[in-house]
Image (cartoon, grey):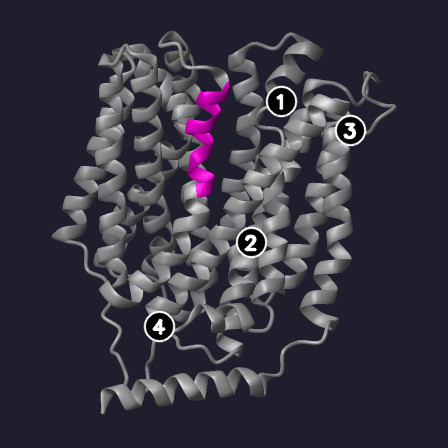
Amino acid sequence: MEWRKKLNLAILFTGVILSAVSYTMPFAIFPNQALSRGVSVSQSGLVLGSSYIVTFLCTPICGKLIGRFGVKRIYLTGILIIGISNIIFGFLEYIDNGAIYFWLALSLRILSAVGESVALPASYPLGAQQFEEGDRGKAIAITEATFGIGAALGPSLGGFLKHQGGFTLPFWVVGGGFVLTTILLIFPFKSEKIQKKAEDRVTSWKEIILCPGIMAYGLATLIAGTSNDWFNATMEPHLFEQFGSSSAEIGLVLMTYSIAYTIGAPAVGVIIDRGFSCLWAVLVGHLCISVSFLFLGPVPGLEYHPVFQNIPVKFIALFVQGIGSALTFIGTLLGMEKCSVKGNLPKTEQTHGMVSGMWLLTVSLGSFIGASSGSAIYDVAGFSWSCTTEAILMGLSIPLIYILVRCAPRIKTQRINNIQQKLAEMCSTKTV
């Protein structure tokens, strides 16, 4: 790999890590700060959870923007928005009125989520440009792994910086990092110029949705996405009730998932590049997640058994879930990419951005559903039944996904080709 591409990757991955840090850092330092201003727990949850809805609404727009303005400009704009919103967020330290504090925090969190919705879909095609065509799986997997590193680092980094310099310091440091990354993007960073051909055209969302296989992989991503945040609001009270665990100990347990995912994602990208089926990666990943939730609960009837209800089992279960998530998420993203190629969609930055956007959209929707459903079942039936419900959902999805990808009747390729031909004719007419 050329030295310039290595530099490009270093700058790009710095931005991806900072994006993940910005996403997870407030979970560790914002709630108590908000409570001291008279903001309720539910309002804090609304501020922190608003990013899911914003990502779901804004991500589809990113693919269109990439086609119009180019992947580098879109990525640059996204991280600049995140940086500015973080810097301003730090000034909330000086707001004492609870109502004003809540609305400003919500607005800034939404603004930051808009930047994340723009930057992350652009990061995948931008990172892939730095690798050879045959290493595309490795490129996407490493990009996703760097996001996992940032996600794992965010809470601990936020807590450390807050301890050193108060509430403002974490947001100003991260915001300043985004500004510096933006400057590096403007000057030394070079993205590959993809020569546009006369037959190149704009890819529509209709083509993405109708392309055989993409929606099947999208459903698999959505179902797996529920596991990401299924126990975010319930693990802390569960561990405290069962073992009297401190916040630091709980954070260490939860970090296991991110570590496993970060380790597993590049490995999955490599084995898929070497011929392992994307579909089988997804199926094995779902199976791993299902088994991990059975032990995480554990299943009703064993929730008080000392062999199954202990901290080491929690570590092992979360590690298995992280590996399963790596198999599933890298498998679905690369599966969508391969479906777009088989469906004869244009091999352009815009198409890659839209496919990545569709994948992120389903992940975000799944995370929102998982966070809501996991908490609701916990309130009604407890942690054991909550985890078992998710395990059953993941297990039942395995044959469904296999049928949808391999065995179910697909939309005829001729119909897709007709749509593409009509769009091409429209574009050529406009050009004339």
Tell me the residue that label 3 is attached to.
385
Measured Cα–Cα span from mark 2 to mark 1: 28 Å
Residue that appears at 29% across and 49% down: 12
The amino acid type found where label 4 is placed reads Thr
Tell me the residue at 26%/19% (across/down): 92
- Asked if the residue at tag 4 contacts the one at tag 3, i.e. Cβ–Cβ closer than 8 Å, the answer is no
Q: Are marks 3 and 1 in contact (CB under 8 Å)?
A: no
Q: What's under tag 1, amino acid-wise?
A: Met
Eye-nearest disc, 3 or 1: 3
Quadrant hosting residue 169: top left
Total marks placed: 4
Which badge, 2 or 1, is on the more N-terminal residue?
Answer: 1
Q: Amino acid at mark 3?
A: Trp
Residue that numbered label 2 is attached to: 268
Q: Which residues are magenta?
A: 42-53
The answer to whether one can see residue 309 in this image is: yes
> Which of 223 and 291 lies nearest the eye of the viewer?
223
Q: Check contact, mark 1 vs mark 4: CB within 8 A.
A: no
**Marks 2, 1: nearer the viewer:** 1
Residue that appears at 32% across and 59% down: 126
Q: Which residue is mark 4?
A: 348
Q: Relative to residue 342, is residue 279 drawn left or right?
A: right
